[in-house]
Image (cartoon, grey):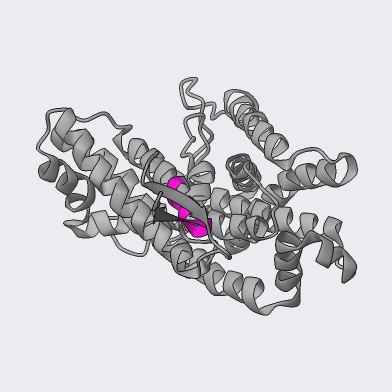
Amino acid sequence: MLPLRMVRRAEPSRAMQWAAPLLAVALTLLFGLALFAALGFAPLRAMRALFLDPLSDLNGWSELLLKASPLCLIALGLAIGFRSNVWNIGAEGQMYLGGICATGLAIHFQGSWGHALLPAMVIAGAAGGMLWASIVAYLRVRFAASEILVSLMLTYVADLLVKYLVFGPWRDPAANNFPITVSFDDNALFPLLIEGTRLNASIFITLLAIPLAWVFMTRSFAGFQLRVAGLAPDAARYAGYSARRAIWIALLASGAAAGLAGATEVAGPLGQLNDRWTPGYGFTAIIVAALGRLHPVGIVLAALLMALLYIGGEQAQVVLQLPAAVGRVFQGLLLMTLLACEVLVNYRFTWSTR
């Protein structure tokens, strides 16, 4: 019999709830060192290329913020649903719909709406994400369909819709048959903040969303209802809180956030819609929300870390000739170690005296 065994805690450990993400990050770094050593690379040099070299200049910092912004925005929306046990896994598809709706306005009205076009695109992006999420909400409320499966499957439908549009009715006739739309005019693009970089004013949407999400989740009555519905469904029903209303709020909020992220992408670094737009932010944001403990401040820090893995993977590809997927390998390691460390919230190790 092994002398070390796991014993269930009398109540979840609050200290481990916050220590688990830090422990997961530390274990990921250790596994990463071992992985690089097994592949024949100098571990410390490889880790430097992955985590430090990308931040050696202004462009690296701007790219970090540019990639962290949509991750943070989507994760904030997902956290609202996750707190109420509504598991929206299809934020990627909702982001696509936000990009589609914003692009539709840009290519049809950019010559006539002037300065009103960009705000309209932002609103359309949020509406598109909410529309896609509303399908999930309706099927969950009306037919008790799993929001996990429905939202995930709708992601692939949204991806095919993007491809249909850029290969068909929205394809730029002057693009030599490449599946892209026309490039957006300046009035349909977020202005650049730092000349010579891609960082644009869309990050202010995320900066505004962070305190708004905190107020909603921790200080609003609707946020309290969602937390109660997630932690104690029976108590929520006894108190008269509508489970259906909670589902609609959670899914529409996360859909709006994902749609906003889609609008900021097409009106920001992309400047158009194309068939290669598959950033994976909607899926990565799930890890960001979990690593950030569903708290806005934690989500900001987790988004910066995941964005660093994105740009670090690109840097390692150039410097060390590593595959571009090395960043995603670290994302997977981080997710696995986080899930493993979650066990310590409800269990503890003890030495057996027998």
Q: Nearer the viewer, residue 259 or 155?
A: 155
Residue numbers of the magenta segment: 340-348
Does residue 46 appear to the left or right of 306 in the view shown? left
Instruction: Please tell me which residue is depicted at 63% across the width and 25% down the height of the picture.
Output: 164
Helix, strand or loop for the magenta stretch, by majority = helix
- Residue 199 within the segment the image draws in magenta: no
Residue 77 coordinates in the image, percent (x, y): 61, 58
* Quarter of the N terminus within the rendering: top left
In the rendering, at what x and y percent does residue 273 appear?
53, 37
Can residue 288 be seen from the camera position used here? no
Image coordinates of residue 39 in percent, x first then y, are 17, 28
Q: In this view, does 312 lie above or below 78?
A: above
Looking at the rendering, which quadrant does residue 158 occupy? top right
Location of residue 73 in the rendering, given as x and y in whole percent from the top left corner: 53, 58
In the displayed image of the protein, which residue is found farthest to the top? Answer: 177
Which quadrant holds residue 318? top left
Left or right side of 158 for 228: right
